[in-house]
Image (spheres, coloured by chain):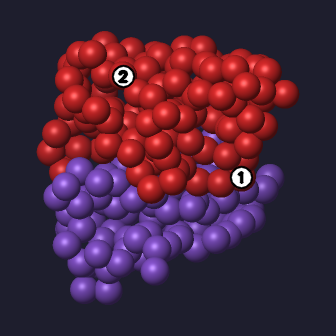
Chain colours: A purple, B red
Amino acid sequence: RKEVEQDPGPFNVPEGATVAFNCTYSNSASQSFFWYRQDCRKEPKLLMSVYSSGNEDGRFTAQLNRASQYISLLIRDSKLSDSATYLCVVSNTGNQFYFGTGTSLTVIP
Amino acid sequence: SAVISQKPSRDICQRGTSLTIQCQVDSQVTMMFWYRQQPGQSLTLIATANQGSEATYESGFVIDKFPISRPNLTFSTLTVSNMSPEDSSIYLCSVAGGGSNQPQHFGDGTRLSIL
């Protein structure tokens, strides 16, 4: 079983739509959780960390469900510039990081 | 976050040659990593670069093929040796603080093509 599994996508949504991605992780002892964004032919960039109580940054909301071992990313009022691949990352106490395979989002005019 | 400079940004190489990629950080960092990302794929960790000691390689990657140096807390190199077309990929260095809640930050990658 993979350490981290993501919705494969691709997600194609119209501008202004709300879209949600989920990511499950297998190690219940995982400590830290992140969402990254990767544009085509660019490096991954940290979008947001995911905190136990959930957190919001503008149009982006991240949530963690430890009982079910998943994290989610919600994007409201999608913009064309949100088109990218979103990577779920999980780390443990040994500073080991596990990357999901990414979910592709295309926002359509 | 740290500013990470990776060189070269891209290269086209002949098979059988070797290329060394440099990663320079503007501040001291605890953890440095080297990844490979093949077209359409997610990131694959090659190794963790340890300051002052041998790198820790992941399964499927060996020191003879991917020697790594990390002479100090701000610099590391990855060499791709005896290259073949299968080594064509994007190679990324990343850094992280020492705590488990510290995210990784990536250099802008080296796009490598082997003819």
Q: CA distance from mark 1 to mark 2?
A: 28 Å
x, y (%) of residue A76? Answer: 53, 61
Q: Secondary structure at mark 1?
A: loop
Q: Which mark is residue B52?
A: none
Q: Is residue A85 left or right of residue A76?
A: right
Disc 1 and disc 2 on one polypeptide chain: yes
x, y (%) of residue A25? Answer: 38, 74
Q: Earlier in the sequence, mark 1 or mark 2?
A: 1
**Nearest the eye: B38 or B19:** B19
Residue A28 in view (yes/no):
yes
Q: Quadrant of residue A96?
A: bottom left
Q: Residues within 10 Å of mark 1 (few under 14, many from 20)?
A: few
* Residue sitting at x 63%, y 35%: B90
B70 shown above or below B41:
above
Q: Give the position of the C terminus of chain B as an image quadrant.
A: top right
Count of labels in the image:
2
The kind of residue tagged 1 is Gly
**Nearest the eye: B20 or B24:** B20
Q: Which mark is residue B69?
A: 2
* Residue sitting at x 27%, y 16%: B71
The kind of residue tagged 2 is Ser
Q: Is residue A26 left or right of residue A32?
A: right
Question: Which mark is in front, 1 or 2?
Answer: 2
Chain of the residue under the numbered disc 1 shown in the image: B
B61 shown above or below B31:
below
**Nearest the eye: A99 or A76:** A99
x, y (%) of residue A77? Answer: 58, 58
Q: Which mark is residue B40?
A: 1
Residue B104 in view (yes/no):
no
x, y (%) of residue B86? Answer: 73, 43
Q: Return the residue found at the far bottom.
A: A68
